Image (cartoon, rainbow, N blue to C red):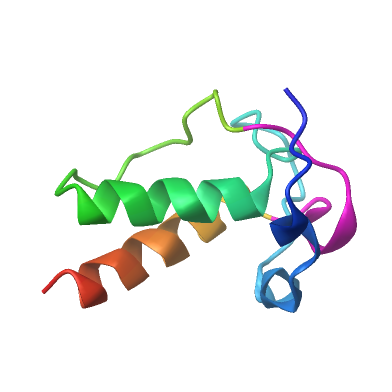
């Protein structure tokens, strides 16, 4: 599945590191969708995942291109923890 949501173009993703390798098969995953997944996990009281859900759509567009989607997931998770307390 390919992400077509506008969050692919948000400037916030520019601060994420590039995914230089594809060891976890997440180099092309949408960082915006990964962020939302982390936020959702935190708000639902789930533990931080060790790897991305493989159902997260792919994206090669905008500011998410080749960004580390797992770092985006962690960022969303951390934000979710702060607003959930």
Q: Which residues are magenta?
A: 57-67
Q: Is residue 4 above or below residue 85?
A: above
Q: Quadrant of the C terminus?
A: bottom left
Residue beneath the point at 44% across and 45% down: 37
Q: Quadrant of the N terminus?
A: top right
Q: Does the magenta portion include 54? A: no
Q: Is residue 67 above or below residue 60?
A: below
Q: Position of residue 34 (x, y in %)?
A: 54, 47
Total numbered labels placed on residues in the image: 0
**For this view, does 2 lie left or right of residue 13?**
right
Q: Quadrant of residue 24?
A: top right
Mostly what secondary structure, the magenta segment? Answer: loop
Outermost residue on the right side: it is: 61
Residue 74 visible to the viewer: yes
Q: Does the magenta portion include 62? A: yes
Q: Position of residue 12 (x, y in %)?
A: 67, 76
Q: Is residue 76 above or below residue 79?
A: above
Return the residue nearer the eye: 61 or 5. 5
Residue beneath the point at 73% across and 34% down: 58
Q: Position of residue 80 (x, y in %)?
A: 29, 65
**For this view, does 48 lie left or right of residue 3?**
left
Residue beneath the point at 48% across and 52% down: 36
**For this view, does 26 lie left or right of residue 80?**
right
Q: Position of residue 29 (x, y in %)?
A: 68, 39
Residue 70 visible to the viewer: no
């Amino acid at each position: 599945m390919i992400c077509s949501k506008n969050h692919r173009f948000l400037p916030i993703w520019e601060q994420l590191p590039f995914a230089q390798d594809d060891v976890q098969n997440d180099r092309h995953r949408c960082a915006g969708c990964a962020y939302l997944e982390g936020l959702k996990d935190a708000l639902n009281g789930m533990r931080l995942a060790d790897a991305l859900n493989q159902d997260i759509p792919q994206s090669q567009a905008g500011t998410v291109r080749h960004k580390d989607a797992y770092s985006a997931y962690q960022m969303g998770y951390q934000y979710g923890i702060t607003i959930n307390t």
